[in-house]
Image: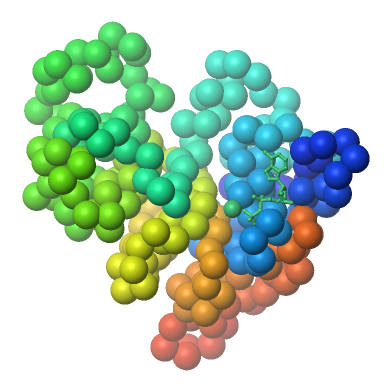
Amino acid sequence: MLELRGVSVLYTRDARPALAGVTLDVAAGECVALVGPSGGGKTTLLRSINGSVPLAGGSIRVDGVDVSTLRGPTLRRLRTRLAMVAQQHDLVDRLRVYQNVMAGALGRWSTWHALRFLIAPRRHELEEAHAALSSVGVPEKLRSLTSDLSGGQQQRVAIARALVQRPSAILADEPIASLDPLLGEQILRLLCRLARERNIALLCSLHQPELARRYFDRVVTIADGMLAVDGAALRAGGAGPAHVR
Ligand code: ADP
Ligand code: MG
């Protein structure tokens, strides 16, 4: 699903590379955690997959398509296959929750469709938003004002929006950094469960290696722009390695 081969990124010509020859695969339905020190290259790696950082070398394939060769409309189309979940949710506070959730469908809607939806949402569209909110555990918030939700609920709405996108991969950049520990764990468990159920590749950066090992299939460490470890994680419950590769 995600295939990175020798990916290098140079922000400035004279500086040390932000990524230096990163090779990594994430299969459909697989949950991979990205851990490592601040400045190690986690955000850069996620942004390079999304095509927002130019590569100095190597290649990135999403669903078999080479990201670095895409421009304009084809790059936009590819981005609809990649859902981003950010540290600070990037919802529009003054919109209703269902409007934020269905923003995930914008990639498959015309401008006209999107405008009509804002003024007069159709019943099946509200049902789709409701279904996505049910899968993240907050269906009752469908018509709430987004700014009235707690931080944890807003992060759930951001995940619902990602699901509406029907992505091949979810790229999450420290999605629990602004939540308290208990809520954060719930969100990680939710992300991993949804990825496995829906066969979505999940690549998620995290600050807590112990949470990464508890919930993810694999934990990858990145420091100084290089991958250090790519091993199988132990699943919670001590059942042994989920799968070793
Ligand atoms: P992490 O997310 O692991 O903290 P980053 O990917 O943000 O790491 O940063 C990796 C390296 O790239 C760091 O040395 C950082 O200073 C540098 N860097 C990140 N973004 C930029 C940018 N927009 N311009 C120049 N350098 C950057
Ligand atoms: Mg970062």
Tell me which residue sits at (20%, 19%) in the image: 117
Is residue 196 in sight in this rendering?
A: no
On-image quarter of the C terminus: bottom right
Q: Is residue 239 left or right of residue 75?
A: left
Tell me which residue sits at (47%, 88%) in the image: 239
Residue situated furthest top in the rendering:
112
Residue situated furthest bottom in the rendering:
238
The x and y percentages for residue 145 are 14, 38
Tell me which residue sits at (53%, 23%) in the image: 76
Q: Quadrant of residue 9?
A: top right
Residue situated furthest right in the rendering:
14
Q: Is residue 130 left or right of residue 167?
A: left
Is residue 93 in sight in this rendering?
A: yes
- How is the protein colored in the picture? rainbow
Taking 96 as reference, is 209 above or below it?
below
Taking 192 as reference, is 95 above or below it?
above
Taking 216 as reference, is 121 above or below it?
above
Tell me which residue sits at (54%, 67%) in the image: 207
The x and y percentages for residue 84 are 47, 43
The x and y percentages for residue 223 are 74, 63
> 86 or 101, which lies in front?
86
> 199 or 128, which lies in front?
128
Q: Quadrant of residue 36?
A: bottom right
> 211 or 178, which lies in front?
178
The x and y percentages for residue 215 are 45, 73
Task: Count every numbered label the image shows and give the total.
Answer: 0
Q: Is residue 4 left or right of residue 200?
A: right
